[in-house]
Image (cartoon, rainbow, N blue to C red):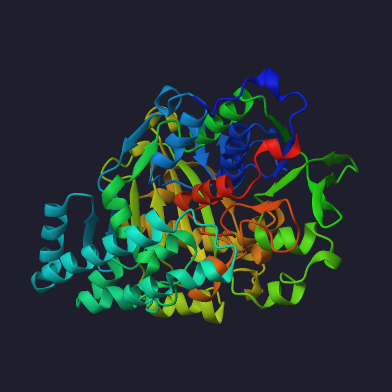
Amino acid sequence: MSNIIDIGKRRGAPSAVVIGSGFGGLAAAVRLGAKGYRVTVLEQLDAPGGRAYVHRQDGFTFDAGPTIITAPFLFEELWQLCGRRMSDDVELRPVSPFYRIRFHDGEVFDCSGDPDAMRAEVARFSPGDVSGYEDFMRASEAIFKVGFEQLGDVAFSTWTDMAKIVPDMVRLASYRSVYGLVSSYIKDPRLRIVFSFHPLLIGGNPFKVTSVYSLISFLERHWGVHSAMGGTGRLVQGLVSLIEGQGGRLRYGQRVAEITVEQGRASGVRLASGEQVPAEVVVSNADSAWTYRNLLPQAVRRRWTDRRIEKAHYSMSLFVWYFGTRRRYDSLPQHTILLGPRYRELLRDIFERKVLAPDFSLYLHRPTASDPSLAPEGCDAFYVLSPVPHLESGVDWDQAAEPYRRAIARHLSTTLLPNLEDEIVTSRVTTPKDFQDRLLSFRGAAFGLEPVFSQSAWFRPHNRSEEVDRLYLVGAGTHPGAGLPGVLSSARVLDSLVPDVSVFA
């Protein structure tokens, strides 16, 4: 393949530094390596993955971050760039149902990729909404064809890039919210929730984010929802293997203190240890607000000033509890969404009032449903996630974490996991404070900037920095946004932005 570079030819090739080894950074490193760069990935943690870090304790394996894999072709592309097949390193299995949504009264809706099964589920809740559901899916497909297929890897470096898509955005009613678009087709209030909750997977309020994100419904039907055997961390390790196979390096425990700038260009980085790492190209997979606020000298920032960063709107944060049980709960699917007694009001508490409500909605992940190897024999591994306000809420998580965990445990015990509190054998939590202190996410926001229309596409921090030449951004905080398809596409954008190595000859 023309994209495969002989490692021996890299001596003397231009160097690239990637800050952070989340999926965006790892994908960027593979793509830079395929261009012929000598790549060094710098990770402040002791292992790769960033938000996709893997916790191992007491015989259990817990994926810290992404658990839902959609658009697997974006991963396959990275293996192809290296002349390899992903299936040789990682086994992906389709998950069905995609999710089981459990309403507060105990009623459940199973989301899947089977059109007939979905029509039957809709009819079971509201026969009069079947035709509206089909119309919504056609609308989702139309948005997908523009928002994902045509624009997902467009750089949006100039305002004219944005101007070109305005007619399409108007035609597709992008000025509406996701919930608003769904409601224009579907009348049943429970079904409106079923088909509008997806923005929460990428840090957005369904009542506020642009209806462009309605494309997720068709994207899931188109490619399905998958799980990696051995956990999502297997994908991380697979990408690390690709980078090392290209001759790239990953250095752990290396915190970047500054992106160095010479004559308006990124010239490398300075580590917290004082070591200088020169580079012709710098790619930041760190949180975009952290990148600009903490890594770039204030003197070179014109657009992403402290004031602008602080005035921006950020996604919610997450409280995540990882736990293992001494028994299995085989009646549970892999993905369950437990809705609380409130929906709109709870989201208002999280996104607008920024208060920690006494009630909650939860996402419960049971990876051992498809891969028992992630727990000791006869046991189950779980990950339960509760959307919570970011740190502007003022919640003292050092004090609030354990009472909140106990409340979640009681709720799970009385709904889906009988006698849970007596069955737990291992446990750990992640709070918004961890997102801030460990993952260096501004205000502890789990997904960076909130994906409202005024912070999407050209309005989002650009993949090619507006402040400094030869500095590029990937990951959730830049275009196109959070979620695995988004962060992998942000690295894909670099193909059209980063200079060919011949420029440096």
Q: Residue at x 40, y 31 (%)?
A: 229
Q: Residue at x 34, y 49 (%)?
A: 335
Residue nearest the observer in this picture, 277 or 315: 277
Count of labels in the image: 0
Q: Residue 249: name its quadrant.
A: top right
499 to 240, vertically: above or below: below
On the question of residue 370 being in view, the answer is no
How far across and down, in percent of the image, does residue 329 sit? 32, 42
How far across and down, in percent of the image, does residue 88 sit? 42, 22
How far across and down, in percent of the image, does residue 192 sit? 27, 72
| In the image: residue 163, left or right of residue 139 | right
Residue nearest the observer in this picture, 232 or 380: 232
| In the image: residue 259, left or right of residue 29 | right
Residue nearest the observer in this picture, 241 or 405: 241
How far across and down, in percent of the image, does residue 217 sit? 30, 59
Q: Residue at x 85, y 46 (%)?
A: 270
Residue nearest the observer in this picture, 220 or 159: 159
Furthest-right residue in this view: 274
| In the image: residue 355, left or right of residue 398 | left
Quarter of the picture holding the C terminus: top right
Q: Residue 288: name its quadrant.
A: bottom right
Q: Residue at x 28, y 73 (%)?
A: 182
24 to 460, vertically: above or below: above
On the question of residue 275 being in view, the answer is yes
